[in-house]
Image (cartoon, rainbow, N blue to C red):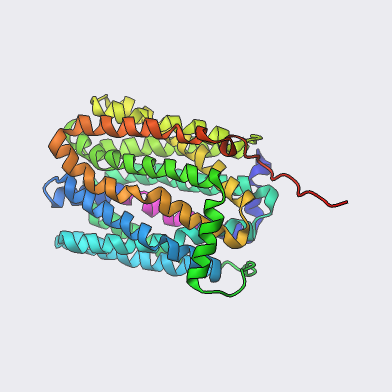
């Protein structure tokens, strides 16, 4: 087990790990703080919360392709540092408005979109840095440890979020998140790494076209992206209606923070399992894990007790992290590094594309048809989406290690 943590001896990886840990500790507080800030400020409107979350998601989707191209053209760590500062400024602006009790919905939506745009510049670059600083044999543990960092801080952040919102208010909780972006940027700036191999100079459109060709040439990539477009679209129902139901029958922000904490504990457990997993065909395990996403929809729909909802979200976390680690490692293994950020951007834009639509639609749908039918419909659609990975052998039979190239005698 200790050998799996030996990657932390690498200086550049250690700085990256610490940067993410600090940033994500603050970001783990943000979902609870932002949800209840908007719900309290806007009279408990699920539609208002949906618009804010959709603005962030839409900003992320719109700029992901640009983020992928820039990450394959520019030094990735510099791009990550700049986008981190932009996200911190946007989050700080939202925090100031709520602290001052002057938070027009339009301004919150605009800054949420800026925050999402910054994430779009950060994410493709962050997907491409592990191969630059970590040897191939240590990439799965390195990826799993990054997920472990994310999920461990989520446990602390989600638990603290409920206390902070109930005591000092959501605005100050959001301000803490903004400060962590700045600290994380300082650590990123301290990373020194050789410039990765780049493709020959070309136009941005040519880079996008080449990235698209690489993306669509691999059915195991785009079929799983299609599946996760529906996963993220459906999970909008939980992201919006979960806090609403928490206010109605679970006890408010502390109860929803407990649910998110259970999810985070599940994610940590998934990370620890994924560190040790060495399947011959990793995407078979990853695809099977997506079945664990379904139960929370039906339990919330029928007003299951808090402990049972939390248990289902724990399972959701375990399955989600096993999938993510095996998926990221498969991309790092089978995609050329000079195209990894662009393919990752197509992956993310495809996976996230239905998220804003779901976030905007779930409020009006629940108002028109009721919360229970909306959650049941989303859960049924998600169940159908889990069949996608089994439609092609290229997903089931993708090996953990690429087959050796044929040699000419």
Q: Position of residue 181 (x, y in %)?
A: 40, 62
Between 209 and 184, the one nearer to me in the picture: 209
Q: Magenta segment, which residues?
A: 19-30
Predominant SS of the magenta segment: helix
- Residue name at image x 48 percent, y 69 percent: 205
User: Of residues 348 and 53, which is closer to you in this image?
Assistant: 348
- Name the image quarter holding the N terminus: top right
Residue drawn at x 44%, y 52% is 348
Q: Quadrant of residue 96?
A: bottom left
Residue 224 coordinates in the image, percent (x, y):
48, 42
The image position of residue 31, as x and y in percent, is: 31, 48
Query: In screen coordinates, is 30 left or right of 364?
Result: right
Question: Could you tell whether 382 is left or right of 336 in the image?
Answer: left
* Res. 211 in view: yes
| Residue 360 within the magenta-colored segment of the rendering | no
In the picture as drawn, the residue positioned furthest to the left comes out as: 43
């Amino acid at each position: 087990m200790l050998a799996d943590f030996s990657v932390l001896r690498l200086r550049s990886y250690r700085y990256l790990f610490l940067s993410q840990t600090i940033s994500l500790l603050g970001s783990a507080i943000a979902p609870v703080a932002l949800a209840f800030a908007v719900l309290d400020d806007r009279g408990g409107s699920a539609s208002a919360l949906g618009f804010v979350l959709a603005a962030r998601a839409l900003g992320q989707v719109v700029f992901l392709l640009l983020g992928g191209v820039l990450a394959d053209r520019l030094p990735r760590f510099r791009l990550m540092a700049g986008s981190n500062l932009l996200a911190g400024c946007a989050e700080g602006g939202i925090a100031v408005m709520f602290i001052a009790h002057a938070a027009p919905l339009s301004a919150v939506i605009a800054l949420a979109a800026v925050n999402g745009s910054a994430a779009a510049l950060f994410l493709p670059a962050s997907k491409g840095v592990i191969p630059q600083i970590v040897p191939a044999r240590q990439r799965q543990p390195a990826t799993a440890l990054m997920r472990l960092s994310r999920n461990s801080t989520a446990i602390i952040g989600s638990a603290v979020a409920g206390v902070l919102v109930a005591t000092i208010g959501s605005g100050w909780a959001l301000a803490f998140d903004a400060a962590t972006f700045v600290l994380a940027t300082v650590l990123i700036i301290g990373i020194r790494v050789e410039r990765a191999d780049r493709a020959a100079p070309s136009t941005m459109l040519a880079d996008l076209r080449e990235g698209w060709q690489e993306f669509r040439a691999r059915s195991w990539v785009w079929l799983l992206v299609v599946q996760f477009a529906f996963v993220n679209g459906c999970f909008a129902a939980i992201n919006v209606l979960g806090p609403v139901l928490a206010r109605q029958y679970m006890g408010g922000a502390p109860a929803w923070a407990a649910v998110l904490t259970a999810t985070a504990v599940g994610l940590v457990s998934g990370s620890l399992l994924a560190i040790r997993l060495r399947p011959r065909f990793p995407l078979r395990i990853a695809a099977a894990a997506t079945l664990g996403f379904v139960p929370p929809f039906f339990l919330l729909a029928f007003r299951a007790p808090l402990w049972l909802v939390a248990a289902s979200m724990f399972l959701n976390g375990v399955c989600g992290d096993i999938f993510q680690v095996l998926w990221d490692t498969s991309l790092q293994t089978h995609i050329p590094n000079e195209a990894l950020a662009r393919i990752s951007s197509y992956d993310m834009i495809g996976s996230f594309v239905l998220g804003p639509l779901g976030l905007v639609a779930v409020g009006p749908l629940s108002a028109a048809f009721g919360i229970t039918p909306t959650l049941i419909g989303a859960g049924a659609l998600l169940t159908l989406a889990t069949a996608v990975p089994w439609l092609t052998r290229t997903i089931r039979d993708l090996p953990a290690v690429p087959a050796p190239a044929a040699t000419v005698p």
